[in-house]
Image: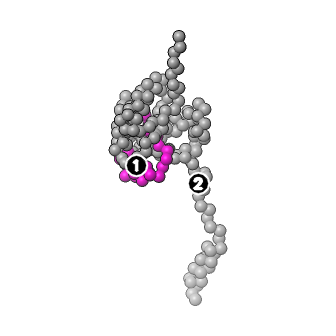
Amino acid sequence: MSQTDQAAGLRRWAESMAPAEPKPSFEAMPSRVLLTLGLPEGAGSDIEPVVDALRRWHEQGQSWVGDPSAWRVVALDVQSPHFTALASQQKRWALWVDDDADGFRRAYRTLKQLAQHPGAPRRLLMVHPPLLSGAGLLGNLRDAASHFFEIQLVMIGFAKPKSKRR
C-alpha cells in the first residue's frame, strides 16, 4: 500500500469520525413569506416599501403582523415563469398599490393579469404607503377587483366611515 493510499484512507476515516456540519436552521430565517405583486418596474427587488407597511401596521396595533422582521417579502411579477408553481405552494399574497400618478392604474393592470391565470390567488393583502386621502381610491380598487375579477383585496389601516347621526 502506498503512502498516498494510506493518507487518503486516513482522511476518509477522519471525515467519518468528525461530527457532521450543522445544517442551517430555518428557525433563524423569516417564518412568513409574503409574495408581493405590482411593485413598480425598475424597483427590482426593492421590497422596503412593503416591509415599511408591515412595520407601520405592527406599530398601529395590528397583532396579526407579529414581528415584522419575521416576514420574508418576495417581489414577483405575474408574468414570472415561476408564478404558477408559487401560486400552488404559497398562501400569503399581496398587491402593492403605490401612491404615484400611475399607482392605481398599475395595480388594476396587475389584477387583470392575475385574473387570467388559472389557479392564481384570489385573496390578496392590499399594501400601500401611508395615504392621507387614499381610502376612497383603495376602496374603488377593492370593489373593481371583486366585481370584475372575483379577487378579494384585504384593506388594513382604514376605519369604515361612521354614519352621521342628526
Q: Residue 18: percent from the left, percent from the top?
A: 65, 71
Query: Toward which corner of the image does residue 26 lie, by quadrant?
Result: bottom right
Seen in the image, is 38 located left or right of residue 4?
left
Q: Residue furthest top?
A: 166
At a point 46% along the width and 26% down the height, the residue shown is 135
Does any portion of residue 99 appear in the rendered image? no
Circle 2 crowding by C-alpha within 10 Å: few under 14, some 14–19, many from 20? few
At a point 47% along the width and 43% down the height, the residue shown is 93
What residue sits right under mark 1 in the picture? 119
* Stretch of the chain drawn in magenta: 78-99
Q: Amino acid at mark 2?
A: Phe
Circle 1 crowding by C-alpha within 10 Å: few under 14, some 14–19, many from 20? few
Quadrant where the N terminus sits is bottom right
Q: Residue furthest bottom?
A: 1
Seen in the image, is 64 located left or right of residue 97?
right
Along the viewing direction, whichever of 43 and 164 lies nearer the viewer: 164
Q: Secondary structure at mark 2?
A: helix
On whether residue 111 falls in the magenta region, the answer is no
Q: Residue 61: percent from the left, percent from the top?
A: 60, 32
At a point 51% along the width and 25% down the height, the residue shown is 160
> What is the spatial separation of the Cα atoms under label 1 and label 2, in whole angstroms?
28 Å
Q: Look at the numbered discs 1 and 2 and tell me whether their residues touch, using CB distance below 8 Å.
A: no
What residue sits right under mark 2 in the picture? 26
Q: Residue furthest front?
A: 166
Q: Amino acid at mark 1?
A: Gly
Q: Residue 120: percent from the left, percent from the top?
A: 40, 46
Does any portion of residue 116 appear in the rendered image? yes
Q: Residue 69: percent from the left, percent from the top?
A: 58, 42
On whether residue 92 falls in the magenta region, the answer is yes
Q: Secondary structure at mark 1?
A: loop
Task: Please determine whether, in this image, residue 52 is positioned above or below residue 116.
Answer: above
Seen in the image, is 108 located left or right of residue 132?
left
